[in-house]
Image: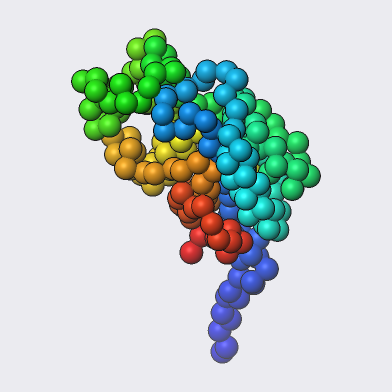
Amino acid sequence: MATRTSTPPTSTKHAKAAPKVTTVILVRHGQTPSTGKILPGRAPRLHLADVGHEQAVRAATRIGELEAVDAVYTSPLERARETAAPIGKVRDLKPIVERGLLECDFGDWTGAELAKLMKLPEWATVQRAPSTFTFPGGESFSSMQHRIVSAIDKLRAAHPGGTIVCVSHADPIKAAVAHALGTHLDLFQRIVISTCAISVLAFTRGGPAVLAVNSTGGSLKELRPS
C-alpha cells in the first residue's frame, strides 16, 4: 500500500512569508562655519558653509541613485533642513520636519568653544561614561538616545518594506548606530560620523542590521542585509 507524503511549501508561499526589510538612511548635516570649533547644539540661525552645501549635493547624488526612496525626514534646525533640501529635490520629495531628529540639547554648554570645554573635568565623563552625564540645563545622553531611537522606530513603522532618509546630527546618529549594534552608550563616542556622512540601518522582524557607518563616497545601491 502506497503511503502519501506531505507536500513541501511552495516557493510562492515561502516568498510571502519573507520578512520585509525597511531601510533607514541616516545623514549628518553638512559642514558649517563653526564645525569643530564650537558646540552649536540647538542654537538657531546656523547655516551650512559653502563646502557644506557641496557636501549635501554629493550626498543627494548618491541617494538619487537608489531605486526608490519613500520619504525624507529632517531635524528642524537650519543646517539639517539645508542638507535635506537637495536630497528632497533629487528624489522629488518634500522633506518633512521631525523633532525627534533634533541635535542633543547641550543646555548651558550651547555655543561654547570646544577647546574650552575639553579643559573641564566633566569632559572626561562626556567621553568615557556618557550614559551617566546630563548637560547642565540640557539633555542627558541617555534621553537623547531614547529620543532618536524612538523617532526612527516611529518613522520606519510608517514605511514598512520601504526606504527613508533621516537628516540629523552627529551625536544622535552615533547613538542610533550604537543602539542598532547593541553597543553600550558609554562606547558610542568611538563611532565617527563626519559631516554629510551616510549611515544605513536595515530593519526586519529579527532586528536591525548596520549596513554602513560614516560612508562619504561610493554607491549605496548594493547595500542589503546578508
Asked whether 43 or 48 is in front, the reply is 48
Considering depth in this image, is 207 or 53 the residue closer to the camera? 53
Numbered marks: total: 0
Q: In which quarter of the image is residue 221?
A: bottom right
Residue 73 visible in the current orientation: no
Q: From the viewer's perspective, is residue 218 above or below residue 208?
A: below
Question: Residue at horizontal 52%, vertical 30%?
Answer: 33
* Residue 79 coordinates in the image, percent (x, y): 59, 30
Check the image and tell me how it is coloured.
rainbow
Compared across the picture, whether 212 is left or right of 14 comes to left
Q: In which quarter of the image is residue 167?
A: top right
Which one is nearer the viewer's eye here, 40 or 172? 40
User: In the displayed structure, does residue 54 sit left or right of residue 110?
Assistant: right
Residue found farthest to the bottom: 1
**Front position in the image: 98 or 217:** 217
Can I make out residue 195 in this image?
Answer: yes
Residue 104 at x, y percent in the picture? 45, 24
Q: Which residue sits at x=51%, y=46%?
A: 197
Residue at 36% x, 44% y is 191
Q: Position of residue 73 (x, y in %)?
A: 64, 35
* Residue in view at x 46 percent, y 43 percent: 194
What quarter of the picture does the N terminus occupy?
Answer: bottom right
In this view, 152 is above or below 70:
above
Quarter occupied by residue 131:
top left
Q: Where is residue 209 in the image (x, y as percent from the top left)?
A: 46, 52
